[in-house]
Amino acid sequence: MPHFCIVVARFYEDIADEMMRGAVARLEQAGASHDFVAVPGAFEIPAAVRFAIESRKYDGYIALGCVIRGETTHYDYVCTESARGLNDLAMNHLAPLGYGILTVENKEQAWERAAVGQGNKGRDAAEACLHMLALKQQWDMK
């Protein structure tokens, strides 16, 4: 049974909880187990995923979070660096990764994408991770 690490940014707790609900439902449907790791915000997700990779306890990693544009350039840095950091980890460590960090203009857009009955991006991130793990296994990569 595959075992996954879900790293979730808790800055927008309500959105994070909904995305976790979607991800967990998909993993359970696939017969997979999971652990949760909470971090303060999206910027901290790559470091936590790296810690999890180094633990060698997991078959894949799911990154969940939400960044809502504000009045400063902070949004741009957080979005760019979290995405870059996660992509670098996936590529450099051959790590199956599901990217579920919402980058939106407002909370309404976030809910449209996070809600299990609508966009269900938590489920999509879990699905992507399951798919990448299957590809890795198909090519007998460790």
Image (cartoon, rainbow, N blue to C red):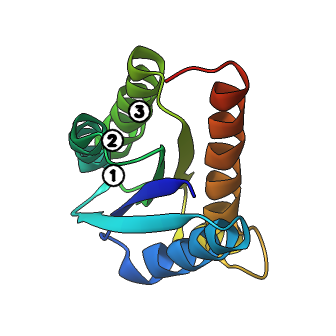
Q: Secondary structure at mark 1?
A: helix
Q: Quadrant of the N terminus?
A: bottom right
Residue 41 spot, x, y in % from top left? 27, 58
Question: Closest to the observer: 69 or 94?
Answer: 94
- Comparing marks 1 and 2, which lies closer to the viewer? 1
**What separation in Å lies between label 3 and label 1 (alpha carbons)?**
11 Å
- Comparing marks 3 and 2, which lies closer to the viewer? 3
Q: Residues within 10 Å of mark 3 (few under 14, many from 20)?
A: many
Question: Closest to the observer: 44 or 68?
Answer: 44
Badge 3 or badge 2: first in the primary sequence: 2
Residue 40 spot, x, y in % from top left? 21, 63
Residue 32 spot, x, y in % from top left? 59, 64
Badge 1 or badge 2: first in the primary sequence: 1
**What separation in Å lies between label 1 and label 2 (alpha carbons)?**
7 Å
- In percent of the image, x 57 and y 79: which residue is there? 21
Mark 2 — residue? 78
Mark 3 — residue? 86
Q: Secondary structure at mark 2?
A: helix
Mark 1 — residue? 42
- In percent of the image, x 62 and y 56: which residue is there? 126
Query: Are the residues at dot 1 and dot 2 in contact (C-beta closer than 8 Å)?
Result: yes
